[in-house]
Amino acid sequence: MVADAPSAAVERTAIKKVSVRLVPFVALMFFVNYLDRTAVSFAEPNGMGEDLALTAAQFGFASGIFFLGYIVLEVPSNMALHRFGARRWLARIMVTWGIVSLLFTWVDSTGQLYTLRFLLGVAEAGFFPGAILFLSQWVPSRHRTKILGLFYLAQPLTTVLGAPLAGWLIGRHGLFGLEGWRVMFLFVSLPAIVLGVVAWFYLVDRPADAKWLTPAERTWLTDALAEENAQKTGHETKHAKGDLKKAFSSGRVWVLALVYFGFVYGLYALAFFLPTIIDGFQEQYGTTFSVMDKAWITAIPYLPAAIVLFFWTRHATKHGTRVWHVAGPAVVGGVSIPLALYMGSPTATVAVITVTACSIFAALPVFWSVPSRFLTGAAAAAGIALINTAGNIAGFASSYITGWLKDWTGAYYVPLYLVGFFMLLSAVLMILLSRRGGTAEPAPAAAHQPVEALR
């Protein structure tokens, strides 16, 4: 059945307004979030490691303990967001993490570093799954991959833009009497506080309250989402009672959590240790890099990753999401990352790492379109938070284990082989889940739209 022209026009304008009004702002919040989260990776090889006398294992633990703090409050935070609304809760999260991040400017011991990294995780808990949940509640499932792809662009672009920015700030050594890495922490923290205040006034919790939509657009979005949620709710009640039980007793949620674990293990192994690996090129290949050189080299893999992410999610939206949109990149990433160990120059090594980065970022936004296909309401809040909790466990594990294995073996061979193993495991699990019909999307709200399924 073909939709009437007025209805199709309202759909187009409504989705466009959400894409322009909400997605860039939430993506900017994510940009600041990720820059703040990975600032420690730029600080370690540029003064902090020496000033605090950090070993690779200690740095890995300091990087990873953030995720333990995040895990403690992640599910409760997302449930609070569902109860109190995204506008209030996301604003609160940003202001509190900005304040904690600001305190890194004056850290002067390993113990203080551990404590602040843990508290930073507690303060940030729930932001990412909350942002995913918030955007998922604004558009029907057939538009979700595109919207989440636009949002996810912020993550690789954080390094593309943030790495040179971090290098420039570190180069301001002596400003306010501070070491360069302390100057960096000072200036990457303030935007979070400012954006948190702005978010309180700018964000809107649901389409029905959006004054920047026309009445017809508000009605269309509200009705389309209500119909879709009714279909999901009807399906879920056959299996479980209670929103939390639906999420925690769902085999699909737990398998997706394991899939996400593999991707995030690779993501943070690169995010936290790539600057250190690049710093090691100087001894390994007998070359010399300035702070800005290292920053630009760190940024190289992430620009192609952003481009691949953009077109990959467009393809998934246009042709329907399939299992290979997630499993394919996992295989490529799992094979490519160990190959980086055997390249004979910095250029070749970074080129292979770029392939890995492209693989990870291509898959992630497509992956996040899956949970909201079969979860709604508080179950979606809990399920998305549970999946992201697995990612935070991976963030801690990859950070600490990578550093520990490097100290133990004296090189990054074993740590990067482990990254490859977990990414290949994600591919296998995604294929098995698809074969059992665990990722099929419910029938779309509009009969004229094609059904997208991971098959």
Image (tube, helix red, strand yellow):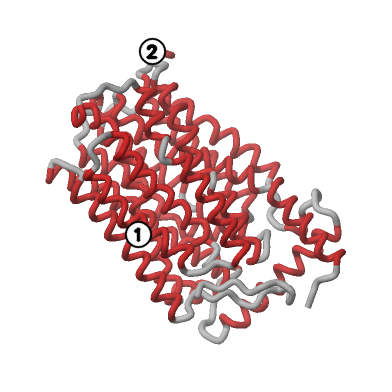
Q: Amino acid at mark 2?
A: Gly
Q: Judge from the rendering whether residue 232 lies leftward or rightward of residue 53; answer left or right.
A: right
Mark 1: few/some/many CA within 10 Å (<14, 14-19, 20+): many
What residue type is disc 1 on? Gly
198 or 266, which lies in front? 266
The one of 430 and 27 positioned closer to us in this rendering? 430
Picture coordinates of residue 40, whole percent (x, y): 36, 35
Vertical side of 91 occupied by 347: above or below: above
Picture quadrant where residue 393 is located: bottom left
Q: Residues under labels 1 and 2: Cα distance?
A: 41 Å
Residue drawn at x 55%, y 34% is: 193
List the residue tagged with mark 2: 174
Task: Look at discs 1 and 2 and give the one toward the viewer.
Answer: 1
- Residue 136 x, y percent position in the rendering: 61, 60
Residue at (54% x, 76% y) in the render: 440
Q: Position of residue 72 (x, y in %)?
A: 39, 55
Residue 262's label in the rendered image is 1
Mark earlier in primary sequence (1, 2): 2
- Figure quadrant of residue 28: top right
Question: Which secondary structure, mark 2?
Answer: loop
- In the picture, residue 287 is in which quadrant? top left
Image: 103 above or below 258: above
Between 290 and 240, the residue placed more toward the observer is 290
Residue 56 higher or lower than 394, as above or below: above
Q: Which mark is residue 451?
A: none
- Say which residue appears at 80% left-offset and 59% top-offset: 218
Quarter that holds the N terminus: bottom right
Q: Is residue 11 shown left or right of residue 123?
A: right
Q: Is residue 81 left or right of residue 162?
A: right
